[in-house]
Amino acid sequence: MKNPLFIPKIFFLIIMAAAMVLPPAPAAAAAKTVAILPFKINADRDMNYLRDGVADMLSSRLHKAGEVEVLNRQVVEKALPPGSAVLTDDSARDLARRLGADFVLFGSLTALGNSISMDAKMVDASGGRPTLSFFEQSEDAGGIITKINAMAADINREMFGRDMAARPGAAAAPAAAPRQPAAPETQAHPEKMFRQRGGLGGEESGTPFVSEEGGRVFSPQFWKSASFKQLFNGIALGDVDGDGKIETLILTPDKILVFRYDQQRFQQVTEIANFQGKYCVGIDVADINGNGTPEIFVTSMPLSRKMMSSFVLEWDGKAFKSVADDLSYFFRVVDLPTRGQLLIGQEHRSGNPFTGRISEMAWRSGRYEPDTEVRAGASNALGLTIADALEKGAENAVAFDSLDHIRIFDGAGQQLWKSADRYGGSTLFYAGNLTDQGEVENPIYFPMRLLTSRSAKEQKTMVMAVKNFDIAGRKLEKFRSYNESQVISFYWDGLGLSPEWKTRKLSGYMRDFAVGDFNNDGAEEIVCAMILEEGRVITTTPKSTVIAFEMIK
């Protein structure tokens, strides 16, 4: 009789033998790392605005979590000797070894007339793969983004075996979950700003912070908070908890951080979160329902960014509760010397945030409803204010257009004046399809906030605007990256809005600003939400800060 265990034993022996002969299952391959160098510019005109922009755009298009990691640009540049350029395969491999990178991408941009050509090389640090060359040419600067997309697609296909071409009509991908921010730091230094008032802690430099166009220097001093590893999308001031002190509300894409400047420190009071499925782009504070407690108006969108889903919060004595939700409005609060605070709302119309009806909003029967229409041409409420801008005793709508020109309208909506220069400048956008690389196609950018105030000394209306300076000098309409900013105050000189005073240029991008008694000392300050690092490139972390300085009237 055959042993009934014979067959199982045979199978066991076969399996054991195979285990010894067959190689083990391969472990997950480690992500490849790429160092992208600043591209060399060959041109008879200043085109340095493309130097960092090309590197950042290529970084976002080559990165893929777990497969391809792009080294931080600042880290790469620090590894380069001052003034050097990597132009050979050997020097590129040497740099890669010092950085611990698998590949180095470097190249040049050459301008001949209007035409711009882009050459690039991808060098394998190990020498195991031949160096690959890539070339694209654009007829003008406006087409360079398309050519960068094409080059990135070629690199992904040739080097990493990935087809990253965007699919026409691809559905917008959900936004990545935001990074959990580190606990905010408390800024105690420097200790003295506005020494004559005994107010904010701050910094002082030899360069005047605010100066008059005629040359008079107001103050070299300002206050600056510690850095926050978060993206600031808005800022507002108001006593939102009824304690008699002004709070600073900082809006991130998915929460509100409530701070109070008290005892020489900028301290967090609370955090309002749980805005699931929303992307917040604007914040205002005002008591519109007339119950004595200011509401918090948040302009927000679903993550698809193709409609509006705004909401209103209010302190009920114990917590911030919802007053209204899923409102199809853009909100902005304006403050008039004659009428107090008004809520401006704009109805959302699919496809273009500059086309919906704009109205003063009224609180009726437990709802915010449109009341008197505000006629301001093709504008968006986020970039609109109301003031006696022409000093004629009549209210004018003052608003940004879609190209960031400031315009003034009469009560019938007729344009009375338009600035020749552009001001504002935001990277917050509406609509636009997301490609497979996470890039936005055809974004419609929101306008910045405009503020107005009345000069007590000279009894004239001031219109205050931010001016963000684009590294590309506004030559690339669909790609925006700002590296400097300032606040400018204008007055009507009989012919147009003329600068009265301005801050010095600040390093970073100003996302929003507000006016109020920031430090509860009885005087008004201008408070700015600054972005030092936007974190659009996957390998970088957002970094923001708050700057405050004395209001000049």
Image (spheres, grey):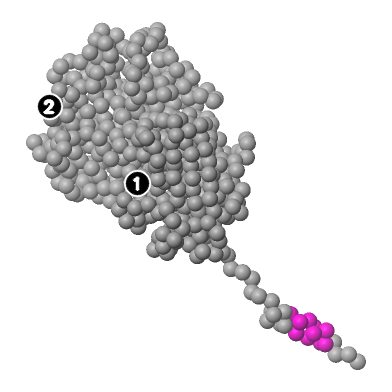
Viewer-nearest residue: 244 or 157: 157
Residue 159, by quadrant, is bottom right
Please state, as top left, top right, bottom left or bottom right, where the N terminus lies in the image.
Answer: bottom right
Callout 2 secondary element = loop
x and y percent of residue 408 in the render?
34, 14
Residue 530, by quadrant, is top left
Q: Please give the name of the residue rendered at 26% of the width and 7% of the height, measured from the top-left corner.
A: 392
Give the residue at mark 1: 543
Pointer 2 with pointer 1, Cβ within 8 A: no
User: Can residue 206 be spotted in the picture?
Assistant: yes
x and y percent of residue 362 in the render?
40, 19
Q: Please give the name of the residue rendered at 42% of the width and 53% of the height, measured from the top-left corner.
A: 87
Q: Please give the name of the residue rendered at 41% of the width and 59% of the height, measured from the top-left corner.
A: 91
Farthest left residue? 196
Q: Please give the name of the residue rendered at 27% of the width and 17% of the height, measured from the top-left corner.
A: 497
Indicate the amino acid at tag 1: Lys
User: Residue 228 vs residue 366: left or right?
Assistant: left
Viewer-nearest residue: 121 or 193: 121
Q: Which residues are magenta?
A: 5-15
Depth check, mark 2 against mark 1: the one in front is 2
Q: Please say whether residue 135 is one of the residues in the magenta stretch.
A: no
Viewer-nearest residue: 57 or 286: 57
Indicate the amino acid at tag 2: Arg
User: Residue 394 vs residue 440: left or right?
Assistant: left
> Would you place residue 351 above or below residue 178 in this image?
above
> Would you place residue 310 above or below residue 80 in this image?
above
Binning the other alpha carbons within 10 Å of mark 2 as few (below 14), some (14 to 19) or many (20 upward) gives few
x and y percent of residue 433 in the render?
55, 35
Give the residue at mark 2: 216
